[in-house]
Amino acid sequence: ETWRTQGSRDEGVDAVAVKRDPLGVTVFAIQAKRSRNVIDPNTVRAMAGVMNDVNASHAIVVTTSWFGKASHDFAARNRIRLINGRNLKALMAEHLGVDVLIGLPKLPPQWRQQDIT
């Protein structure tokens, strides 16, 4: 069960998903970011507060771009899943059967490949 939140003033939540199983209910807060640049770590950090506000036990941040090391580190400690542009493209092909073009710019010189994978 999934629903979109209102378009503006969504307080950081674009959608809420609820997974029900014999062990209980899991609520996910979902934020989508369309960008051609690295997602600011503060976006990911803010999801921890959003999870509390909507009583979600997990969060997902989806982007057409990528996340840096600070975002990955924070997400790993806080039940937040990060889905970058390459992962999003693969998920859309796998689950929707569509091939999409998500353009990612070159990495800045100070970045390493493991910072975004």
Image (cartoon, rainbow, N blue to C red):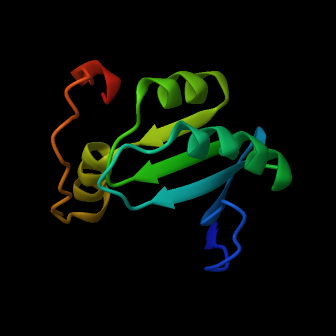
- Residue beneath the point at 45% across and 51% down: 62
Judged from this view, the residue extending furthest toward the front is 109
Q: Is residue 112 above or below residue 86?
A: above
The answer to whether one can see residue 73 in this image is yes
**x%, y% of residue 21?**
70, 46
- The number of discs equals 0
- Residue beneath the point at 49% across and 42% down: 40
Q: Quadrant of the C terminus?
A: top left
Which corner quadrant of the image does residue 22 belong to?
top right
**x%, y% of residue 69?**
43, 24
**x%, y% of residue 92?**
28, 58
Query: Considering depth in this image, is 70 or 94 the residue closer to the camera?
Result: 70
Query: Considering depth in this image, is 103 or 95 the residue closer to the camera?
Result: 103
Judged from this view, the residue extending furthest toward the bottom is 7
The answer to whether one can see residue 25 in this image is no
Query: Considering depth in this image, is 77 or 56 the residue closer to the camera?
Result: 77
Which corner quadrant of the image does residue 75 belong to?
top right
Q: Is residue 37 above or below residue 76?
A: below
- Residue beneath the point at 15% across and 61% down: 101
In the displayed structure image, the side of residue 103 where residue 45 appears, left or right: right
In the displayed structure image, the side of residue 60 where residue 103 appears, left or right: left
